[in-house]
Image (tube, rainbow, N blue to C red):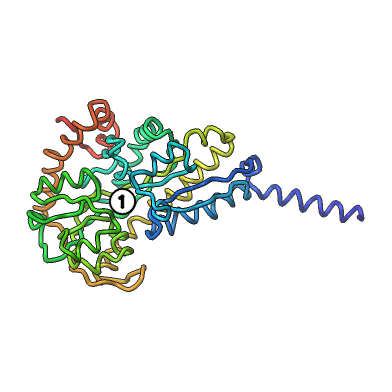
Amino acid sequence: MHKSRRLAVALLAATTLASVPALAQEIEPVTLAVVGSWSSLPLHKNYEKPFWTEALPEASADAITVELTTFDQMGVAGGDVYRLLGDGVFDVGTTVADYIVGDAPELEGLDVPLLATSVADAHKMVEAAWPMVADVVEDRFNAKLLTIAPYPPQVVFCKGEVKSLADLKGKKVRGSGRMTTKFLDALGAEGVNIAFGEVPGALERGVVDCAITGSGSGYSAGWWESADHLMTLPLGGWDPVISAMNLDKWNELPAATQELIASKAKSELEAPAWDAAAAALEGDIACLTGSGECPLGEPASMTLVEPSAEDVATAEDVLKSVVLPDWAERAGPDAVARWNETVGKAVGVTIGE
């Protein structure tokens, strides 16, 4: 090869290498078995799937490869995901925090109904709770916390007319978590535990009168075909979804790989999901009610029921007098003290006062 040509090739190789992030150059090849959240919902389709199958492999210069599925595609219950993760059945697991509170009641404090009525407040709560959640995930499930991402606010879908919170009294309502079910019971409703995918049929058959889920989740799953009234008071909080890696697998990885996965998961999965949450809520309501442009598809025509000042006051009173004290008994004094110093301080609420 001519000397000048050899020099050109060498310069091109050097330039190409320099264009690859320094961290990626240090990543050793690894394949990760990843289980995502509900396959049909926007969080997985718009954020989890692109991150694990595109963004992370690209950031590692294809040193990291991912075998991705979701717990519903596997036929695994959401509440079993972290038990299997802790046993090393797969490397990364994702599920709704409320699904695993039977094993870790402390996690109920991550998603308290009505404490956050805006995306900014919900994100502030999650950031405050992060160290507590990380410790619980490690201690209870042998896992390393990677992300906490939001579903849209958990609103109320009803078949039949409702005009206010008081109209839920005597109705059978599917809750989105243990705290929400306790809240419904305190209102005089009957909290019913039904799996997400079974809700449309339950509404059609009259097994439940109303059901709570995220606004976007309800649209994507077609709940508007069975329900006709939408109450936007966020009775179910924001239903955070947590992702974590089996701790044994995490500890096997070189430091550079750990750093890349942790930083990219925060910046390219969690952060975009939060950034999109505010706009998503407005779009979701437009899609469900036909009140504006629907970015997701054909709009439905549900009747919008916005909360009154009386509804908000009633809900807050029930939360502070019944729901939080009930959780405090289950979680124990250490968890409550830590919650008061973190999440409680962030939202201006102290349990026990």
**Can residue 131 be seen in this snapshot?**
no
Left or right: 45 in relation to 333: right
Q: Position of residue 52 (x, y in %)?
A: 51, 51
Outermost residue toward the right?
A: 2
Look at 25% across and 67% down and name the residue there. Answer: 224
Q: Nearer the viewer, residue 128 or 136?
A: 136
Compared with residue 335, is residue 75 higher up or lower down, i.e. above or below? below
Outermost residue toward the top?
A: 334
Q: Residues within 10 Å of mark 1 (few under 14, many from 20)?
A: many
Residue underneath mark 1: 119
Quadrant in the picture for residue 24: top right
> Which three-letter amino acid code belongs to the residue tagged 1?
Val
Compared with residue 146, is residue 190 higher up or lower down, i.e. above or below? below
Q: Position of residue 150 (x, y in %)?
A: 35, 50
Q: Position of residue 29 (x, y in %)?
A: 63, 43
Q: Is the N terminus in the top left, top right, bottom left or bottom right quadrant?
A: bottom right
Left or right: 103 in relation to 185: right
Q: Nearer the viewer, residue 291 or 103?
A: 103
Q: Is the C terminus in the top left, top right, bottom left or bottom right quadrant?
A: top left
Q: Nearer the viewer, residue 288 or 212?
A: 212
**Can residue 310 be seen in this snapshot?**
yes
Outermost residue toward the front?
A: 75
Compared with residue 287, is residue 28 higher up or lower down, i.e. above or below? above
Q: Position of residue 115 (x, y in %)?
A: 22, 44
